[in-house]
Image (cartoon, rainbow, N blue to C red):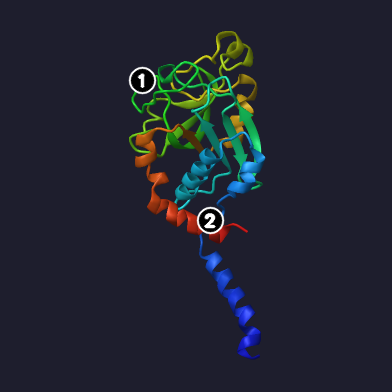
Amino acid sequence: MSLPRCLPLVLALVAALALASVPAARAAAPSVERLARAAPTLDREVLSLATRALACAMQDPDASRPATLSVIDYSLPSTEPRLWVFDLERERLLYRELVAHGRGTGDNLSTRFSNRSGSHMSSLGVFRTGESYVGINGYSLRLDGLEPGFNDLARERAIVIHGAPYVDDGIARAQGRLGRSLGCPAVRPAVARELIDRIRGGSLVFAYYPDPAWLQRSRLLADDCAAGAAADTAAGTP
């Protein structure tokens, strides 16, 4: 076989070997376009940051492939659904839900965030979901913060996802805001168990607010990490 005739086969083999060398978790970076079509009410810039942080987190060779990506946009009022949960394998939207913020974070609008115990504030950044359990708020889900200085004390602070009766459309209409938590992203009781079971055990939660300090200092949004993640996304996206 002459070289010109076998060249396509050689190139295909090289491409296959290169793709195989990319770890499975890293090669599975989702398409922003497909996720955006599935969730048209989610701000495109917020979604882009979430997938950027996801791709960066997936570069960790010890990280398991997350089944879902949850995005909370705390720049929206509490009276609007501002939690989206995506199935990453099928790149489809699973949930769009109301979610409460901490008492110290604000009234209807979020304005303050903290990583400090006793602040009763929500935290920003990327979390990895842990184990589910039954506690004082019923069926709940532990979160581990992946961002030093911003949310890495989440487990110590008992920042968890749980159902709460004050996450309710009727309450929101009556008082102009949802009820507030002690810093936890609380959801409707009717959906809590189903949602928790869907995202527990190593999936990612991206909690956003246009906070300059976090946006500038987050290691999962850093340019050098983003460059590597972009290369992996190009290699892994059909």
For image coordinates 64% across by 91% down, the residue present is 2
Asked if one can make out residue 79 in the rendered structure from this viewpoint, the answer is yes
For image coordinates 59% across by 11% down, the residue present is 171
**In x, y percent, where is residue 6?**
64, 84
> For the image shown, how many numbered marks are present on the structure?
2
Q: Which of pointers 2 and 1 indicates the residue nearer the eye?
A: 2
Question: The disc labelled 1 sits on which kind of residue?
Answer: Ser
For image coordinates 49% across by 47% down, the residue present is 52
**In x, y percent, where is residue 95?**
64, 32
Q: Is residue 98 left or right of residue 151?
A: right
**In x, y percent, where is residue 8?**
63, 79
For image coordinates 37% across by 45% down, the residue present is 219
The CA span between labels 2 and 1 is 38 Å
Query: Which numbered circle lies on residue 233?
Result: 2
Question: With respect to residue 9, does 157 lie above or below?
Answer: above
Q: Which of 173/101 is in front?
A: 173
Q: Mark 2 Cα within 10 Å, few/some/many (few <14, many 20+)?
A: many
Mark positioned earlier in the residue sequence (2 or 1): 1
Question: With respect to residue 201, does 32 lie above or below?
Answer: below
Q: Which of 1/193 is in front?
A: 1
The kind of secondary structure element at disc 1 is: loop
Query: Which numbered circle lies on residue 119?
Result: 1
